[in-house]
Amino acid sequence: MDLDQFAALRTPEGSAALAAATEVAGGDPLVAAAALRSRGVPAGLAAAALTQAELRRRAVGKFGPEAAAMFLTRAGLEQATRRPVADRRAARLAAAGVRTLADLGCGLGADALAAARAGIRVYGVEADPVTAATAAANAGAAGLADLFTVTVGDATTFDVTGVDAAFCDPARRRAGTGRRIFDPNAYSPPWDFVTGLAARVPHPVVKVAPGIDHALIPAGAEAEWVSVDGDLVEATLWCGRLAGVPRRATVLRPGPAGGHPAAEAHELTGAGDAEAAVGPVRRYLYDPDGAVVRAHLVAELADVLGATLADPSIAYLYADTPVATPFGRCLEVTDVLPFSLKRLRALLRERRVGRVEILKRGSALEPERLRRDLRLAGEAPASLVLTRVAGAPTVLVCRPLADGVAAG
């Protein structure tokens, strides 16, 4: 989408085309395009409207009902923060006394809109004119244009001396190709600029990929990993006056899809350098949430659960009794086998297992290939955990506990 196409979507004719596109989108794109043309919508406007309708449909999972009125780009939607995560981050900024915020590379405006909803005055900067236009339109649609304004420009040249805080979510894919960037100094803005914000503003906040190398975390910063309903989605670096504990794993459990009640949040904190005790496989296995694993807080979770590792390099925990926790999934171990396809196949056949989920850590086996090789027949379900125990390839046959026991 270019600026002319975006401007066309903002006209009365464009609004009508968007409404029509919403009715026909979601199926065969050729049929949908033909349906719009049959209503007299020009081909170019029809294509732009159908693209927006499809992006809005995908965006519901991130933004809820508000997605229906938003303007989106493919790249912007991919990088945009989920509403519950952005709202929680904005609440923390507001609680710290932040009243003005520079969003350096604001994208579609997801984080800026959350901050504005929290009463913070936001100055957005976006290098791409189309993306900047969508962010401004989204602020208007949300009724927040008086609290969130956007300028087109280079985030690295924006004067931050007059704001309380700066937020930056550097682009980690190359424009035009979508290819992932692995060199932090090739981010936009580059990593040295991003980390340098700590010396320029009292409350700097940086959103990063959850797979960030711990060596890149600035000294003195708090690193928080966030998962939503078990899906690890991002990490945040809280710097300057915002820094608290060294490491934090946050698990969010939002309400039903399509609405945005306050997310239920659970936090596990620590320095991230503790070591869990190692022992044998026990009756219950815990698969820690990805936020806990990435934050290097598995040992802290082990302490909470009274659990141990069976291999010092594998993040599965084992305990004698089940403990309700939001920080991991619990399974009951029924069998422990040194890995042997023949023995495993015979056991599952004896149990009449026909459906398996396959979890793995520390195993080179390909789950789908193993599933084919097992030649399952039967109706009973089972969970297979491919792992190592004291360095040896091992398979654990398990059954998940009821949700109320495992998730708390």
Image: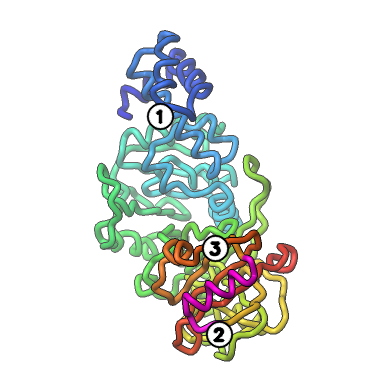
Q: Are marks 3 and 1 in contact (CB under 8 Å)?
A: no
Determine if residue 252 is in view: yes
Give the mark nearest the N terminus, 1 or 2.
1
Residue 256 point in image, percent of width and height: 67, 46
- Ranked by sequence position, the earlier of labels 3 and 1 is 1
How far separated are the C-alphas under marks 1 and 2? 49 Å
- Residue 90 in percent (x, y) is at 55, 52
Q: Position of residue 140 (x, y in %)?
A: 51, 30
- Identify residue for label 3: 376
- Local crowd size for mark 1, using a 10 Å CA cut-off: few (<14), some (14–19), many (≥20): many
Q: Amino acid at mark 2?
A: Leu
Tell me the SS state at disc 1: helix
Q: Within 10 Å of the Cα at label 2, are there few (<14), some (14-19), or many (20+) other Cα atoms?
A: many
Q: How is the image coloured?
A: rainbow
Closer to viewer: mark 1 or mark 2: 2
- The magenta segment is 337-352
Q: Is residue 408 above or below residue 55?
A: below
Of mark 2 and mark 3, the one earlier in the sequence is: 2
Callout 2: SS: strand
Residue 97, visible in the rendered structure? no
What residue is shown with label 1?
51
Query: Per the image, is 117 magenta?
Result: no
* Residue found 38% across the figure and 23% down from its top: 30
Looking at the image, is 124 positioned above or below residue 303? above
The residue carrying mark 2 is 309
